[in-house]
Image (tube, rainbow, N blue to C red):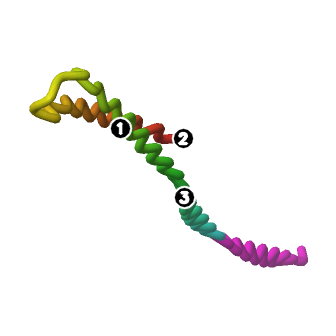
């Protein structure tokens, strides 16, 4: 009677690969504001002659200033 032995060898290799991806996004917003200012000055001078012998003249001055900002 013969006895025979059979040997089986099983090798299992497990490889695990982990990939980590990090994404960083930076957003920069620059706002530029341009302002234009216009100033208009109007001066009105009125002289009234009172037509008398004392030379009494009346002078009225009106100054108007308008400022516009765009």
Nearer to us in this view, 39 or 63: 63
Q: Residues within 10 Å of mark 1 (few under 14, many from 20)?
A: few
Q: Quadrant of the C terminus?
A: top right
Q: Residue at x 85, y 75 (%)?
A: 6
**Which mark is nearer the camera, 1 or 3?**
1
Residue underneath mark 1: 65
Q: Residues within 10 Å of mark 3 (few under 14, many from 20)?
A: few
Residue 32 image label: 3
Question: Which secondary structure lies at badge 1?
Answer: strand
In three-dimensional space, the C-alpha distance between marks 1 and 3, rounded to whole angstroms, equals: 29 Å
Nearer to us in this view, 24 or 9: 24
Tell me where the magenta segment starts and ends, as one range.
1-18
Left-right relation of 20 to 4: left
Above or below for 46 versus 28: above
Residue 41 image position (x, y, % from top left): 41, 44
Q: Residues within 10 Å of mark 2 (few under 14, many from 20)?
A: few
In three-dimensional space, the C-alpha distance between marks 2 and 3, rounded to whole angstroms, equals: 14 Å
Q: Residue at x 31, y 32 (%)?
A: 47
**Which mark is nearer the camera, 2 or 1?**
1
Left-right relation of 12 to 2: left
**Magenta segment, prevailing SS (helix, strand or loop):** loop
Question: Which secondary structure lies at badge 2?
Answer: loop
* Residue 3 appears in the rendering: no
User: Within the magenta stretch, is there residue 7?
Assistant: yes
Image label count = 3
Q: Residue at x 29, y 31 (%)?
A: 62
Nearer to us in this view, 39 or 45: 45
Residue underneath mark 2: 70
Above or below for 16 versus 39: below
Residue 13 image position (x, y, % from top left): 73, 76
In three-dimensional space, the C-alpha distance between marks 2 and 1, rounded to whole angstroms, equals: 17 Å
């Amino acid at each position: 009677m013969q006895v025979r032995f059979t040997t089986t060898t099983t090798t299992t290799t497990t490889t695990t690969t982990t990939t980590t991806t990090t994404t960083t996004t930076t957003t920069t917003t620059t706002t530029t504001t341009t302002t234009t200012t216009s100033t208009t000055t109007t001066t009105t001078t009125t002289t009234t002659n009172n037509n008398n012998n004392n030379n009494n003249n009346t002078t009225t001055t009106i100054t108007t200033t308008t400022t516009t900002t765009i």
